[in-house]
């Protein structure tokens, strides 16, 4: 690995998730604290987790990523909503003598919930630990060649899993977590960055898949999943299941779901896509496969080392991706 810009540790920062049935409700209560989410909604989401044994895949996938990293630094891991909590990890870093750490966040895009909220998490954790190390969040990596290569490879593999007669005309349907329209409008320094970055990533993946498949051109769409919140509050649309129905009405008979908005197969991927969207496709008689997320693809793993060697990113302006008046998030990761 090359230069590490004076960092003496790498901190992986993630969302966190339950790892046994009795963890699920306390975890969900952490996620929605202060947001006024009805108890019935928590019970509904709890049932999703319990259907998978009360375990979210996200924590193990963080462990797998950390094990795969090839960096000349000690690696720490802290979560927003479940063990290991970020504050506890920052305290351990301080006790270990860490002075300056790079933070790799398992979210690639600009928005309040995928960037600014993590910066706030880091600030709160440091404020709670006297003498805490300096922590520099690495840049957004939605367009990094390592992320694009990993997603293109997984998309090609998903296409190859379709029956031969369905493969040629299959639509690529890129999915990302829906957010309130008001949050999307203020994402990034001048607004609109969340959608713009997702569209750019989808374009790059589609182009690379085309190059790898003898220059074919393929249609693609960007749609949304996992919305929540009061129905009167507008969120980004269309929903992935609604979009599959619309494609079917247009005569599209096969599709590949590409969860471009996620870097690991956590609960919102395995439930909203592998259960709900898959059931919709089965009802429609549509051939459907789902690409894996970047996970521990070798190019994604090597990307982390490449980010560490880049010049230290400029800090985000305080006005970038402002917090919504009442943050709304579905507790489904």
Image (spheres, helix red, strand yellow):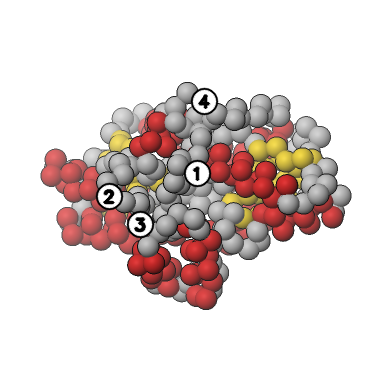
Residue 113: assigned label? 1
Query: How far apart are the two marked residues, 2 and 4, measured between alpha carbons?
Result: 28 Å
Question: Answer yes or no: do the residues labelled 4 and 1 have beta carbons within 8 Å?
Answer: no
Q: Earlier in the sequence, mark 2 or mark 4?
A: 4
Q: Earlier in the sequence, mark 4 or mark 1?
A: 1
Q: What element carries label 2?
A: loop
In this rendering, the answer to whether 251 lies above or below 289 is above
Q: Can residue 163 be seen in this view?
A: no
Query: How far apart are the two marked residues, 3 and 2, measured between alpha carbons?
Result: 18 Å
Question: Answer yes or no: do the residues labelled 4 and 3 have beta carbons within 8 Å?
Answer: no
Query: How far apart are the two marked residues, 4 and 1, measured between alpha carbons?
Result: 15 Å
Q: What element carries label 1?
A: helix
Q: Which of 268 and 149 is in front in this view?
A: 268
Q: Mark 1 packing: few (<14 Cα in 10 Å), some, or many (20+)?
A: many
Q: What element carries label 4?
A: loop
Residue 284 image offset from top left, x and y in percent: 17, 55
Q: Which of marks 1 and 2 is nearer the N terminus?
A: 1
Q: Nearer the viewer, residue 226 or 7?
A: 226
């Amino acid at each position: 690995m090359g230069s590490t810009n004076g960092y003496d540790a790498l901190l992986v920062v993630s969302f966190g998730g339950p790892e046994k049935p009795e963890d699920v409700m306390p975890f969900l209560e952490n996620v929605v604290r202060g947001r006024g989410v009805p108890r019935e909604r928590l019970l509904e989401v709890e049932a999703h987790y319990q259907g998978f044994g009360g375990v979210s895949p996200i924590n193990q996938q963080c462990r797998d990523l950390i094990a795969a990293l090839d960096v000349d630094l000690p690696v720490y891991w802290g979560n927003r909503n479940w063990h290991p909590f970020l504050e506890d990890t920052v305290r351990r870093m301080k006790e270990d003598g860490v002075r300056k750490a790079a933070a790799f966040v398992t979210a690639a895009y600009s928005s309040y919930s995928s960037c600014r909220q993590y910066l706030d998490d880091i600030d709160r954790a440091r404020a709670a630990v006297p003498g805490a190390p300096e922590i520099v969040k690495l840049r957004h990596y939605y367009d990094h060649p390592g992320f694009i290569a990993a997603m293109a490879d997984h998309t090609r593999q998903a296409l190859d899993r379709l029956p031969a007669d369905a493969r040629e005309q299959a639509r690529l349907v890129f999915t990302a977590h829906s957010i309130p329209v008001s949050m999307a409008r203020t994402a990034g320094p001048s607004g609109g960055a969340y959608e713009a970055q997702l569209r750019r990533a989808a374009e790059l993946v589609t182009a690379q898949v085309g190059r790898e498949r003898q220059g074919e051109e393929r249609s693609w769409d960007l749609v949304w999943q996992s919305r929540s919140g009061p129905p009167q509050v507008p969120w980004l649309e269309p929903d992935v299941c609604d979009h599959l129905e619309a494609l079917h009405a247009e005569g599209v008979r096969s599709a590949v779901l590409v969860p471009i908005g996620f870097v690991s197969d956590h609960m919102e991927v395995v439930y909203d896509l592998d259960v709900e969207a898959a059931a919709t496709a089965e009802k429609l008689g549509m051939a459907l496969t789902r690409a894996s997320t970047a996970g521990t693809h070798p190019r994604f793993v090597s990307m982390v080392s490449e980010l560490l060697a880049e010049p230290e990113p400029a800090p985000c302006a305080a006005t970038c991706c402002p917090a919504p008046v009442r943050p709304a998030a579905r507790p489904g990761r």
